[in-house]
Amino acid sequence: MLAVSARQRLELFLFRSLVSFPETVKKVSASAVHAVLPEAELLGKPHLIGFYAEQSMEAKRMRFLGDLLEKELPGTKIVWLEAWDNPLNERLRATIDLRNQCGGVPYLFNRKTGKVLCGVVAYDKLRAWAQGLGGDARIYRDLGE
């Protein structure tokens, strides 16, 4: 029997939820995530999902900013999923990005608000996105101006 990690169970759960009910993408409940992940691994209730690629400099920059955000805002956790080398994660990203507005990484999704970020964005926009403040559900493309 194959051993399945808690992270793989979460990825599979999110994938099944989004494929089965794409119209309820932002409504995957925190309690359902608790059912998939052991309490010790949760570190709060992750509702922020980031897709990245090891080969992408832009994605590395966003992961760095995400790490800063997690340090600045206690209880904030971004679940990072590698999308280029993992077909399941890429399929999940493509399912969330139904209209293919972004089409790649970095791609960040807030399950509570349904808002997304695409590409490299300024830190203040990342923080506002994570807190669910301001903005709208459109994809931001910001070159860090």
Image: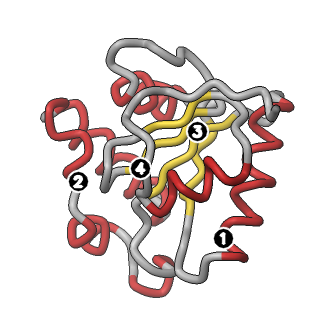
Q: CA distance from mark 2 to mark 1?
A: 21 Å
Residue 71 placement, left or right of 109: right
Kindly state the secondary structure of the residue where label 3 is placed.
strand
The relative height of residue 134 versus residue 119 in the rendered view (above or below) is: below
| Residue 24 visible to the viewer | yes
Relative to 23, is 4 on the left or the right?
right
Measured Cα–Cα span from mark 2 to mark 3: 17 Å
Mark in front: 2 vs 1: 1
Q: Is residue 1 visible?
A: no
Seen in the image, is 97 located left or right of residue 41?
Answer: left
Q: Quadrant of the C terminus?
A: top right
Mark 4, residue position: 110
How far from the left and from the top, in percent, is residue 33? Answer: 30, 66
Q: Residue at x 26, y 46 (%)?
A: 26
In the shown orientation, is residue 74 left or right of residue 57?
left
Of mark 2 and mark 1, the one earlier in the sequence is: 2
Q: Describe the colour scheme in one phrase.
A: secondary structure
Mark 4 to mark 2 CA distance (whole Å)? 11 Å
Q: Residues within 10 Å of mark 2 (few under 14, many from 20)?
A: some
Q: Which residue is mark 1?
A: 70
Q: Nearer the viewer, residue 47 or 20?
A: 47
Report how far apart the C-alphas of labels 4 and 3 lie in the structure.
12 Å
Q: Amino acid at mark 3?
A: Phe
Image quadrant assignment for residue 92: top left
Q: Regarding mark 2 in the picture, which secondary structure is present there?
A: loop
Q: Earlier in the sequence, mark 4 or mark 2?
A: 2
The label number, if any, that marks residue 28 in the structure image:
2
Amino acid carrying mark 4 in the image: Asn
Q: Which residue is mark 3?
A: 51
